[in-house]
Amino acid sequence: MPDIHIKRQHHLGLADARKLAFRWAEVAEEKLGMECVYEEGKTSDRVSFSRPGANGELKVTKDSFVLDARLGMLLGLFKERIETEIVSNLDELLQHAEPLKVFDKELAKRTAARKAPARKPPAPKRG
């Protein structure tokens, strides 16, 4: 059983969730000294992470992130602080990603509407 279990729903789709997970892994490596291994799948991805005293994985799907981590005895003493930091970082990444996704959809609709050929009104029927 993991010491830390965090689940976050999103509406990004797998491609954008994958980008966000890559960013999460980069930050984990840079700021936390984690070693991360990213495995892509057809319907979900997995980021395995480890460092002395902690290991786990982040599962990435088209509509959720699920993080499970196990802490060693020393880091277990700081579980609440570590969990709070992970939640904060993940929520911040999602907060910045969600508005962009909505904006991208709206922009795509507007661009498609501009590129659509102009329609002529139907000719009146003569009786």
Image: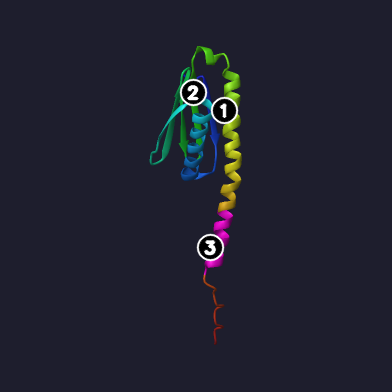
What residue is pinned by disc 2?
69
Q: Residue 6, position in %: x, y? A: 54, 28
Asked which quadrant contains residue 114, the reply is: bottom right
On the rendered structure, is 8 left or right of 49? right
Q: Nearer the viewer, residue 65 or 37?
A: 37
Q: Which residue is mark 3?
A: 112
Q: Which element is circle 3 on? A: helix
Measured as percent of width and height from the top left, residue 115 is found at: 53, 67
Q: CA distance from mark 2 to mark 3?
A: 44 Å
Measured as percent of width and height from the top left, residue 26 is found at: 49, 34
Residue type (three-letter) at the residue carrying disc 3? Ala
Render colour scheme = rainbow
Vertical arrangement, residue 101 with respect to residue 71, above or below: below
Mark 3: give few (<14), some (14-19) or many (20+) Cα within 10 Å: few
Q: Residue at x 46, y 43 (%)?
A: 14
Tag 1 residue? 86
Q: Are marks 1 and 2 in contact (CB under 8 Å)?
A: yes
The magenta segment is 105-116
Query: Which label's residue is closer to the chain start, 1 or 2?
Result: 2
Badge 1: residue crowd in 10 Å (few <14, some 14–19, many ≥20): some
Name the N-terminal-most of marks 3 and 1. Answer: 1
Q: Amino acid at mark 2?
A: Ala
Task: Give the label, 3 or 1, closer to the camera.
Answer: 1
Residue lying at 57% horizontally and 23% vertically, measured from the top left = 83
